Each structure stands twice: as C-alpha cells, then as structure tokens.
Image (cartoon, rainbow, N blue to C red):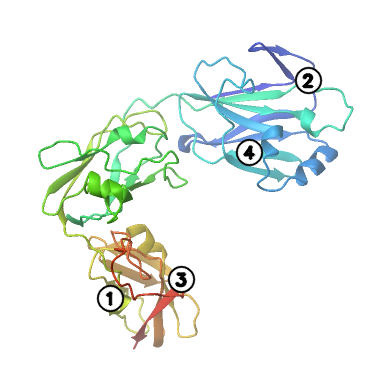
Amino acid sequence: MLACLVFGLGITGGAETASPSSTVSLHWLGDTPAAGRATAEVTGLSASALAKLQSFAADSGRWTEVLAVYAESEGTTAAPNDGATLPPMLGRYRIEGSALRFEPAFPLAAGIVYRAVFNPETLQAAGGAAAAPVVAAYQLPAHRSVESTVVSAVYPSADELPENLLKFYLHFSAPMSRGHIYQHIHLLDGAGQEVELPFLELDQELWDPAMTRLTLLLDPGRIKRGVRPLEEVGSSLQPGHRYTLMIDHAWADAAGEPLRADYRKSFTVTAAERTPPAPADWRVTAPSAGSRGALVVTFPRPMDRALALRLIRVAAPDGRDLDGAVELGDQERRWAFTPATPWSAGAHALVIATTIEDLAGNNISKAFDVDVFEDVQRSLTSETVPLPFAVK
C-alpha cells in the first residue's frame, strides 16, 4: 500500500517542489483495503476554516475546490489539477470534529494511484498570503496472485424467460471493476453466434454500492411495440429459441484480477408477458399462531428478484410492520417471510408496493409495454395494495 504525505507542494510543469510545511496535514485512512475502501482526511484546520466549510451545502460543488481526489494510471506524472487528468471523483464529504473527510462513492481499484489535493487557499480570508496545495497519494496493495472472484449467481434463475425480458442481475463473489463491462458480456443464440447489441449500454453502470451486483438491462427499444429499433432490427430474443448469457473470465475484479472462469446461463424463450401482475392471483399460505413458521406466497409467474425482496412487507393486526427475514426461491416464484417473534392470531396483510415488477417490467399499476392502439382500462392511484390473510 502506498500512502505518502506531502506538505505544501508547489506544482510547476508537472514537477513537485517542496515548500515550508504548515500545521495542516492530509493523509489516507485505509482501514479496509481488501474491500477497496479508503478515506482522504485533512486535519489541523483552523476554526475559521471549519466554519467556512460548514456553510457549504451538502451537494455544493465548492467541496471539490477545497479537497478533490483524482484517479490516475500507475506511473502518471501529470499534476492532478492541470487539466490533463479525469475530473474529480464522486464521493461524500463530511466534517468530523476538526477534520474534513472524503469517502469515494465506489471501491478503489488496484493499479490506480489516487491523488488527494487539498487547496488551503480556498478557505483563507481575502488578502492572505497564497498557500500551496497539500497532496497525498494512495494505492491499494499489489494484486492477488490467484484468480478467486466468480459469478456467484445470475437472476432471473428460471430456465424459461419471456421474449420481453427486461433485465438480468449479475452477482459476483467480490467487488468488481468499473468501465468497459459490455465487452465481457455476451448473448449467444442457439448456434453460438453473438446477438447484435442486445443490451442497453449505459455510461453510468448500474452497480450496487458494494460493486458486487450489476443490473444489466436489455435494450427497451427492442422490446416495446411501435418503437423503431424493434420494427427495424427485431427483438433480441425470439420465442422458442435457445440462448446463452455468457460472462467471460477476462473481466477484472476490483483487485485487477480476471474472473476464475467463464460463466454461462442457458435458457429458452417463451411468449412475451404483457399483463400486469395481480396480487389477487397470488396464493398465500399462512402460518399458525404462536409459531415462527414462514408465511409463504406463491406467484403465478416469476417476479423481479430485487424488487420482490424489497417491496413486500407484512403488517400486523394493529397495522405496524413486522420484523423478519425474507427469502425468494423456486426460480423467484416463492416468497417466504419468517418473523423475528412468534405470530399472533388475527387479521394480517401483505402490503405490496404497486411498483413491484415481473420479469418483463410490468408492475401492478400498468404493463411495461402498452400498445397505443389498445384500450387500457387499468389505473391505480395508490402507492401500495393490501393482500389480507389470517393467522389462526
């Protein structure tokens, strides 16, 4: 791990020259380097400087004028504020006691030098003597010598998926790297040929904060009826055909190591699903009063895994939400809730957000793909719908 501390640096033509040190120091806190987490911290700030920082709005762009972190390729010598590098990294600023801290929004990657630059001049009173920037660099430990990260799961897990499938969730056993992800994800047809441009390739990749789950969207333009890409190119998935989602092992994790092996998920495509899910069609199996048995809900068709785990809650007879653990199984057709305390007898209810979706993006309020020539009667104004059940 590289964590160098430099006081009062002056930057001229890409070279760093020392000047007299000040009481302000800048350093990195790398408490969990294995997870790619580190914090840049400025200490020794005066009371007036802290007061000025406190006046900044939480989302103010002025933070980066005071403290900015730049990601540079290993061996880069250009100064981080000379316009030759990428813009400042995104992250969270906060003041703790007399210290200013910056936490990057995403895990850091091996092989990258992260250079924090503190500009004390921006906090000085008008007319004060110019103060040189304070700079500290940080680099994660060397790469692991073994390839250990794998694709741990892909959802939906069903072997049959609808023609208008909207998304995949890719789960990894360790944090992954960002950028150029689509060159490592392939959709192959039954003959092993790659399907042309099946995914919606976003600049802002849809990672969870831990960088272990990626939401991969299929191109909606090749799903929605009446949209030009569907009419001109056709659907990415054809009913009755067999496909394979392939993730190649060259994809690097956050430590810069490739995946241990390729991952393949094969599936058959069924007809498009264009009707909203209806909770009235869900089968609820209630547990016995006094037990901690699971409440089980069976869906007629698979549901979006991430949303089903998050958008269904259980209300007690008095209306309060029950604490407990939720699991999803049987290829996302079976939702089970185990309470933290035994069930009480009486009328309970599932409280279901109307934004919950099936695999095609249809939610309780409306279908994802509505033909403009169809007479659509369905309309819901509430944010949730109840599904009552009794515990006896």
Q: Are marks 1 and 2 in contact (CB under 8 Å)?
A: no
Q: Nearer the viewer, mark 1 or mark 2?
A: 1
Q: What is the quadrant of the C terminus in the image?
A: bottom left
Q: CA–CA distance between discs 1 and 3?
A: 22 Å
Compare residues 221 and 313 and report the one nearer the observer: 221
Q: Which residue is mark 1?
A: 282
Callout 3–callout 2 Cβ contact below 8 Å: no
Q: In the rendered structure, which amino acid carries the disc numbered 1?
A: Trp
Q: Position of residue 61 (x, y in %)?
A: 67, 40
Local packing at callout 4 (Cα closer than 10 Å; few below 14, some 14-19, many 20+) is: many
Local secondary structure at mark 2: loop
Picture disc at residue 102:
4
Q: Earlier in the sequence, mark 3 or mark 2?
A: 2
| Residue pointed to by mark 3 | 323
Q: Taking 109 as reference, is 331 left or right?
A: left
Instruction: Please name the amino acid that badge 4 sits on.
Output: Phe
**How far apart, in angstroms, are the residues tagged by discs 1 and 2?**
69 Å
Check disc 3 and give the amino acid type: Asp
- Marks 1 and 4, how far apart in space? 47 Å
